[in-house]
Amino acid sequence: MSEFAQMKQLLEDTGLYDVTDGSLIKAELMAYAAGLDTYFDALDSLKRECFVATAEDYGLQYRENLLRQLNLLTTTAGRQNALLKAFSLTNADNTQEGLEKIRDSFNAHGTFSYDAAGMTLTFTCTDTLTAEQRTLLEQQFPSYLPAWCFFTLS
């Protein structure tokens, strides 16, 4: 039910008002309803953008900026899934499964290899990266890894 219909119903139920075409009360209610519809649309948008799973626009952008995280996918669903994975990371995610979870939070594809002698973790990315994406991935990925680990991207 629209805001106008709700207000009209409430006023007519009192028995004091008869909201008819051409009446001043109808014009006044329509003006209020237009403002309220705009307000409630904005509230619906805000409510949707507050949650990663339902965000579509500025809610996703805000969280990506907050994490300063590159996302290799540009679809809404891909961005949502990557953020949900990124927010689920804990300090215990330094296992092979944890590394894959971190990789998935970037929507990147590839494999990890570890050189115990040099304490180097190498990520072989199977995605075609632009120079900018590669630089961002090299800058951002290590912040999720243990401090003792050196990271290389190949």
Image: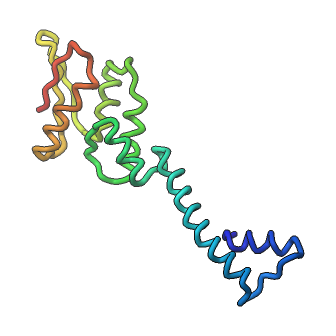
Q: Quadrant of the C terminus?
A: top left
Task: Please report the residue visible at 47 percent of the width from the left and 50 percent of the height from the top.
Answer: 49
Q: Is residue 8 above or below residue 54?
A: below
Please indicate whether residue 43 sits to the left or right of residue 99 in the image.
right
Task: Please report the residue visible at 42 percent of the width from the left and 54 percent of the height from the top.
Answer: 56
Q: Is residue 95 above or below residue 70?
A: above
Across the whole image, how many numbered discs are drawn on residues? 0
Please indicate whether residue 13 sits to the left or right of residue 99 in the image.
right
Q: Quadrant of the N terminus?
A: bottom right
Task: Please report the residue visible at 25 percent of the width from the left and 25 percent of the height from the top.
Answer: 143
Q: Residue furthest right?
A: 15
Where is residue 137 drawn, in percent x and y?
Answer: 19, 36
Please indicate whether residue 94 sits to the left or right of residue 19 in the image.
left
Q: Is residue 146 above or below residue 129?
A: above
Task: Please report the residue visible at 19 percent of the width from the left and 43 percent of the height from the top.
Answer: 127
Please indicate whether residue 38 sits to the left or right of residue 59 in the image.
right
Q: Is residue 147 above or below residue 42?
A: above
